[in-house]
Image (cartoon, helix red, strand yellow):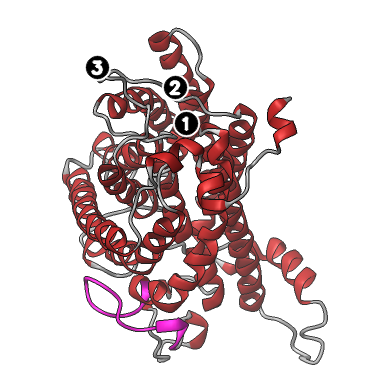
Amino acid sequence: MFKTITKPGRHFPLVILLGFALCGTAFAQDDAGPTNMDLKVMADTVWVLIAGFLVFWMNAGFGFVEAGLCRAKNAVNILGKNFVVFGLASLAFWIVGFAIMFGDGNAFMGLNGWLLGGADNSPLMGDDYAGVFSSLNWTSVPLLAKFFFQLAFAATAATIVSGCVAERIHYKAYILFTLILVGLSYPITGHWIWGGGWLGSMGFRDFAGSTVVHSVGGWAGLAGIFLLGPRLGKYKADGKVQPIQGHSMAMVFLGGLILWLGWFGFNPGSTMAVDPDAISMIVVTTNMACAASLLSATIVSWLWLGSPDFTMTVNGALAGLVAVTAPCAFVTVEGSVIIGLIAGIIVVPAVLMFDSLRIDDPVGALSVHLVNGIWGTLAIGLFATDGGLFYGGGFESLQTQLIGVVAVGAFTLIVSFAAWFLVKMVFGLRVSETEEREGLDLSEMGIPAYGRDALMD
């Protein structure tokens, strides 16, 4: 995570407004009144929680995009996965995940702070206060605010997996895998980068999670796709791709806009402080990368496929958002536009490449989150104004970023394959051919997404 250094006096007017709006008469009995630091902590906490709410709301966006890009007979199953995932992530991350990711331990994983037990290392407590979450001591917001914000990120990684394995996986299999991913695999690699682990120590940077969140979700989903195999009817007898159309572009449209909005919490919220300059810059770099990427993806699909494929437009927007997530705080606006343009250009052939390799990814999650998570992480080594190759920094930063991409990818793939095999032994992975043809809404969920009259209309 990015460490923000702020000057309390500089933000005093904003802090005053937020602080008094929230605290009311909380300090009425204190003749001295709240200090600048008290007000700053209040403002920072409100900002972090609001950003966390926006990231939480992204679950709705993922659910709509995924359900819309899949068939109507599986819509309830998809929506169910995207609804239950936050509950599963909340428990797994609270019990063990947060401690493994941010608790004090060693270079590999955290070993303290189970169930949020143990003291916070907030700078408000003084230099001599012994806490167990040293990796988060750069932000003064309360520990529970730190936990909620990071929880929203952890749930996002698991939601990405849902799209990869859509339309043929047992509901209970996805539930068990989510608990393993959020409770163990995601926190370990997150600790390497954000928790004081070995990658962060060697200079690897990922501001808001192109690798920590998006690539990890993509690698985990890729392992699931390998073990599940393609959906029935995806490939013809001669091996050619048979496109399976989604059932609601209206859902895709709404989901895409929800995610675009949610990213304004995802990226600038990672400052975890009310720093006007940093927040404003990150909002703009995030938005411009998205804008550039959706346009380049639309143009590429128009030229390549003969029409401006709307699904490619939406996935292009998401690709740009994923790509800029890591470098958003380290690049100029011009740099973010270039990063977005490239993200949109590569997302279209990536979708077609995975299809040609018989890697059936129903919603293009691998192309968006894995491919562009990697691209965005490497882009720091190219476009970062402090150390990037194009700013006179040489290859050192790019090399470090590449090491991180390979290490996180290898670890996540290995652990995910092991986890999927475990799930397969416990519950089985894939529904039967009859259930798949019937649709998971009836076979797994017991209820259709649309009533019979609606389907007849």
Quarter of image, res 99: bottom left
Q: Is residue 284 above or below residue 169?
A: above
The foreground one among 2 and 303 is 303
Tell me, yes or no, if residue 263 can be seen here. no
- Amino acid under label 2? Ala
Residue 110 highlighted magenta (yes or no):
yes
Quarter of image, res 335: top left
Dot 2 corresponds to which residue?
A: 297
Callout 1 secondary element: helix
| Residue 238: mark in rendering | 3
Quadrant (top left/top right/bottom left/bottom right) for the N terminus = bottom left
Which residue is rendered at x = 30% and y = 63% of the image? 185
Q: Is residue 137 above or below residue 200?
A: below
Q: Earlier in the sequence, mark 3 or mark 2?
A: 3
Residue span colored magenta: 102-118
- Amino acid under label 3? Asp
Q: Earlier in the sequence, mark 3 or mark 1?
A: 3
- Amino acid under label 1? Asn
| Residue 315: mark in rendering | 1
| Residue 80 position in % (x across, y down) | 56, 52
Tell me if mark 2 has few (under 14), some (14-19) or many (20+) residues whose alpha carbon lies within 10 angstroms of its own. many
Alpha-carbon span between mark 3 and mark 2: 29 Å
